[in-house]
């Protein structure tokens, strides 16, 4: 990785991943303009262009998104506005000031029928409105800024936002058992691992689509089981099917991600990063309020 100091502009900087990208970039010595939703609404095209023109960053990391997978089924228009069209506006504004764009996408652009980990060249076929909106965002980004990094990741967890691991730990302390889906498999990804990989990518000219997710794969039930075992929580995981769970948005049955690109950063096995995360949570809990 180049040690060059860059000026980065991060949108959606208040989100779970955005916070980690900002922290990792500052730690790496980059200049960072961190813009949460109150500072920059990425759907307000003129404001986006003006802000980028004023800041003139080397690269933009677009972490802003509509991330309510079930909500998107009923709220297609807001989801497409934020996930589909706004990324194209941000990417074009970046191109106008000579900046590269790093945009986040999702394993939910795949239908889950491949039966083995998806690589970058695999055909997309989203099942849900959320997945369709994320695919639209990939396309609108790629169309307007040749210096793009479209990074598909999956099943994020980290200190900065609501995530499955936290939900399981809360439920596991309240109940004797939890019912968790066992027929959806993916690649759990620790936000700080992903943030570091994004910074490594940005320092290159290796543009295009990249798959960056925790190494390995598991089902949600396996992730819950591993979380309880490692955190010492005495709660039984009852494996159920997707059909029993009855959520509004369809989800891919198998959406583990792998990379076919030699230079794409590889992340730690998800179990190792889960352990790191549990340690970070425990340390945070000891900090006086
Ligand atoms: N979470 C996952 O498991 C997962 C998996 C695969 C891919 N991804 C992708 O990774 C990226 C980051 O996800 P995340 O988990 O960090 O999501 P997140 O915690 O929901 O963060 C998204 C951020 O975008 C902000 N935002 C919403 N509308 C905005 C607007 N109009 N202008 C500017 N900012 C706006 C949100 O602000 P408010 O909180 O104020 O709404 C929030 O801070 C997204 O592209 C997501 O699709 C996530």
Image: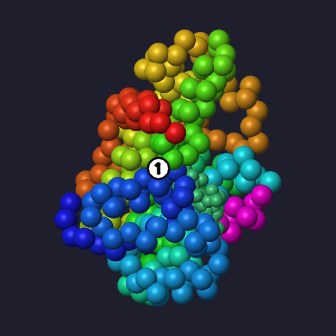
Q: State yes or no: Cβ of the residue under disc 1 lies below 8 Å from any atom of ligand 1.
A: yes
Q: Residue at coordinates 30% horizontally, 46% vertically from top-left?
A: 266
Residue 36 in picture, x, y percent from top left: 55, 65
Span of residues in magenta: 75-83
Compared with 232, 4 (above or below) is: below
Q: Quadrant of residue 140?
A: bottom right
Query: Which residue bears the numbered disc 1?
Result: 153
Name which residue lies at 47% across and 55% down.
19
Residue 207 % position (x, y): 35, 68
Q: Residue at x 73, y 29 (%)?
A: 245
Q: Residue 177: x and y, percent? A: 65, 14
Residue at 27% x, 64% y: name it. 29
Q: Is residue 57 visible?
A: yes
75 relative to 241, above or below: below
Specify whether 279 is left or right of 107.
left
Ligand 1 image position (quadrant): bottom right
| Magenta run includes residue 202 | no
């Amino acid at each position: 990785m180049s040690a060059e100091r860059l000026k980065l502009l991060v949108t959606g900087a208040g989100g779970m991943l955005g916070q980690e990208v900002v922290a990792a970039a500052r730690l790496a010595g980059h200049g960072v303009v961190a813009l949460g939703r109150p500072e920059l609404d990425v759907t307000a095209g003129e404001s986006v262009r003006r802000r980028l023109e004023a800041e003139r960053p080397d690269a933009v990391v677009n972490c802003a998104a509509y991330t309510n997978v079930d909500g998107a089924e009923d709220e297609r228009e807001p989801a497409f506005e934020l996930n589909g069209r706004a990324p194209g506006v941000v990417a074009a504004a970046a191109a106008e000031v000579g900046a590269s764009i790093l945009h986040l996408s999702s394993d939910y652009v795949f239908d889950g029928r491949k039966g083995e980990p998806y690589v970058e060249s695999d055909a997309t076929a989203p099942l849900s409105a959320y997945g369709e909106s994320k695919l639209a965002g990939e396309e609108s980004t790629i169309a307007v800024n040749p210096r793009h990094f479209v990074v598909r990741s999956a099943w994020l967890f980290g200190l900065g936002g609501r995530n499955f691991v936290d939900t399981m730990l809360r439920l596991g302390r309240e109940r004797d058992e939890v019912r968790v889906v066992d027929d959806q498999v993916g690649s759990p990804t620790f936000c700080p691992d992903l943030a570091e990989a994004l910074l490594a990518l940005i320092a290159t000219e290796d543009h295009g689509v990249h798959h960056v997710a925790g190494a390995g794969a598991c089902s949600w039930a396996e992730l819950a089981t591993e979380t309880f075992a490692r955190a010492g929580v005495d709660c039984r995981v009852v494996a159920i099917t997707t059909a029993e769970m009855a959520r509004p948005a369809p989800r891919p049955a198998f959406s583990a991600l792998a990379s076919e690109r030699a230079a794409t950063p590889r992340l730690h096995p998800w179990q190792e990063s889960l352990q790191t995360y549990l340690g970070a949570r425990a340390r945070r809990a000891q900090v006086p309020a």
